[in-house]
Image (cartoon, rainbow, N blue to C red):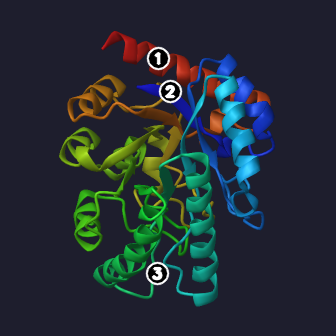
Amino acid sequence: MKLGFLTACLPQVPLENLVPWAASQEFETLELAAWPVKSTRDYQARQLDAAGLKSAEAEKIKNLFDTHNMAISALAYYDNNLDPNPRKRKYYHDHLKKVIQAASLLGVNLVGTFVGGRLDKLPAENMKEIGKEFRRILKYAEDRGVRVMIENCPMDGWQRFTLPGNFAFSPELWQALFEEVPSPNFGLNFDPSHLYWLGIDYVRAAREFGTKIFHAHAKDCEFLPEGQYRYGIFGQQIKPTPWKSGWWRYRMPGQGKVNWKEFITTLRSVGYDYVLSIEHEDPEWEGSEEKVKKGLQMGREFLAKVSSAI
């Protein structure tokens, strides 16, 4: 498997600087962040201006990657594609289509996103609406030679305190999702860290849904005993911090409790041999470009060592 990372962790580093640095650190791929310019959510960036990409600029980008013997594993744009506000939903869908078009121009056949969710409807009603919207999105992508994948992050608290905001976080939901959108070009950007804190067997899930794993995120997770005692599984209540439960946190690969040897072995056993893309959300290695890069280096070195030993 090739090793890479999602570029959203370095939002201020332009692509022309990021590609040679990544190559110098022995990364082989980059998962390019492609959020719109007006986006304000955290863990997002735009090393690629999908809305403004033209053929000539796409060729320059391809040449940049070729020069450094690098590849683009996927384009990334994660927003709420089921937003109950029709104006916002249209904006998100319009940009997602621009990202799909950019992928086609770049010769990249994978775009990652969220299905999202609306909390004014029941989960089963959400799934029906997801099916209606994503059948249209898939048709647009397929016509351009692009596949669409959904990351399995629950996005807890994204839209409303304590509740999930992305209805694609469990095997139950994946089964319903793929029944609603029965396309071979619709799959998962599989991240074991989310399953770990949810109490779901990520190895079994990878085995069961192996044919739907298009891309894999490498992110670790650990529990915080003091937080488990003070807050329980519903997390901090009096002074909640968005995205931070207080009883678990994301870590770089090798710094948490994911069994990477078993996970990588399972991916290989189901025929996955594409990319392990580090998604850097480790609070111990944030705060400066230098620290983020150091975290990425640590993660790559750990994954390379585990992979070579299998």
Where is residue 240 drawn, in percent x and y? 60, 63
Badge 2: residue crowd in 10 Å (few <14, some 14–19, many ≥20): many
Look at 73% across and 57% down and name the residue there: 53
The first of marks 2 and 1 along the sequence is 2
The first of marks 3 and 1 along the sequence is 3
Badge 1: residue crowd in 10 Å (few <14, some 14–19, many ≥20): some
Residue at far top of view: 309
Where is residue 264 drawn, in percent x and y? 32, 28
Q: Quadrant of the C terminus?
A: top left
- Would you say the residues marked 3 and 2 are in contact, meaning their CB atoms lie under 8 Å apart? no
* Residue, disc 3: 118
Q: Is residue 282 above or below residue 27?
A: below
Q: Which mark is residue 304?
A: 1
Front residue of 118 and 25:
25
Horizontal relation, residue 306 to residue 270: left or right: right
Q: Amino acid at mark 1?
A: Ala
Q: Is residue 271 above or below residue 304?
A: below
Where is residue 192 drawn, in percent x and y? 37, 42
* Residue, disc 2: 3
Front residue of 142 and 17:
142
Of marks 3 and 2, the one in the foreground: 2
